[in-house]
Image: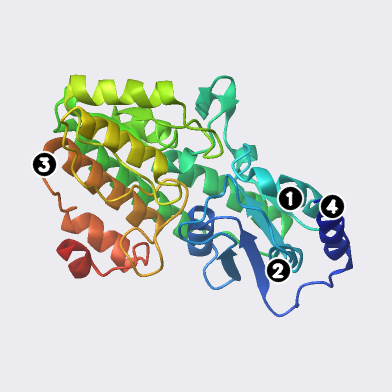
Amino acid sequence: MRRLALSLVALLFLAGPAPAEDFVLRTTTEMLAQPLAFIFEGQAEVSALLGAGTDPHTYQPTRLDVRSMVEADAVTYHGLLFEAQLLDLMQQLEQRLPALAAEAYQPADDLLRDGGLPDPHTWHNPVLWIETVVDLSRALDELTDLDLSEERVGMLREAALQTDAWIDAVFADIDPEQRTVVSAHDAFQYYGERYSIRFEPLLGLSTASETKLARLNELVDLIEEQNLSAVFSETTVENAGIAALREGAARRGLALRALPPLFSDALAPAGEPGSTYFGMLIQNTINMADAMSGQRLVPPASLLDFLGQNGLISLTATEARAQ
């Protein structure tokens, strides 16, 4: 491992400068890349290092990853130990180019904590996340040749407010006693706080934590006591823990519905529902509300039209309504 680390450092400092004709902005995730690409449309090539189904908590960079970051004009990442295996790389990049962590633009009072550790999963609160991205964009405007578009910032904020209002209305119509979700890991506390939902995760803040038998049994007890059906796996988490939970429930005669996995730490593959930031929020909301109430919701046409017309969801409004 030390030899690999040294070779990465060598590559970091030997790589040449980025081509001058295009501004290249690299991010770690699509949750960062997509709103930044919207704000700086036409000014930069914006792309994410980690794709659909990739777990940022445990991902380790390859040589190609390092080169793609080194050859960028600027880099952004989440911080708060979310991309724990990339932290050394980001610290080295700071010596060479603007490498900005979103955590620097999130007030400490807005952060939730678990055992003293700040929770990095802030993108599940759309209003908080878009304000973070806007402040990050202002820093990029000051440090680079990029020019922030106030018009596009306003559109992005409006998208967050409309999405937030719809999600809030969805859960306001569901009995509070039904608003409990069992998830694979502790990624949804910002969502839960925003929309008054109780999340009971199997794992902690990081997917690198281990499944504990005592916690698994606690959750089976909870499912039985409250007759819960909202038990979800996640697209970036190994399914063995939730599978064991379902087996434990089945041994007690509890039949849990087969549910689509939640998008926690990454989006869906391109072109699929959940492949955009706002599409992810919509799909998670539809699936959780369905598990709680048994009703498959359709977002209002006004929301889908606004997001679709501004390129903030990958499906047209008509296609989205048909999902």
Q: Nearer the viewer, mark 3 or mark 4?
A: 3
What label does residue 294 carry, if any? Answer: 3
What label does residue 64 carry, if any? Answer: 2
Instruction: From the top left corner, tell me how far across and down residue 309 is, in percent.
Output: 30, 67
Cα distance, mark 3 to mark 2?
46 Å
Of mark 1 and mark 4, the one earlier in the sequence is: 1
Of mark 3 and mark 2, the one earlier in the sequence is: 2
What label does residue 95 carry, if any? Answer: 4
Q: Residue at x 75, y 67 (%)?
A: 67
Of mark 3 and mark 1, the one earlier in the sequence is: 1
Q: On the image, which quarter does residue 293 sit in?
A: top left
Cα distance, mark 1 to mark 4?
9 Å
Q: Residue at x 65, y 38 (%)?
A: 104
What label does residue 219 carry, if any? Answer: none
Q: Is residue 178 left or right of residue 199?
A: left
- Residue extending farthest to the left is 295
Instruction: From the top left corner, tell me how far across and down residue 307 is, in percent.
Output: 31, 60
Q: Nearer the viewer, mark 4 or mark 2?
A: 2
Which amino acid lies under the numbered mark 1 shown in the image of this protein?
Met
Q: Which residue is mark 1?
A: 90
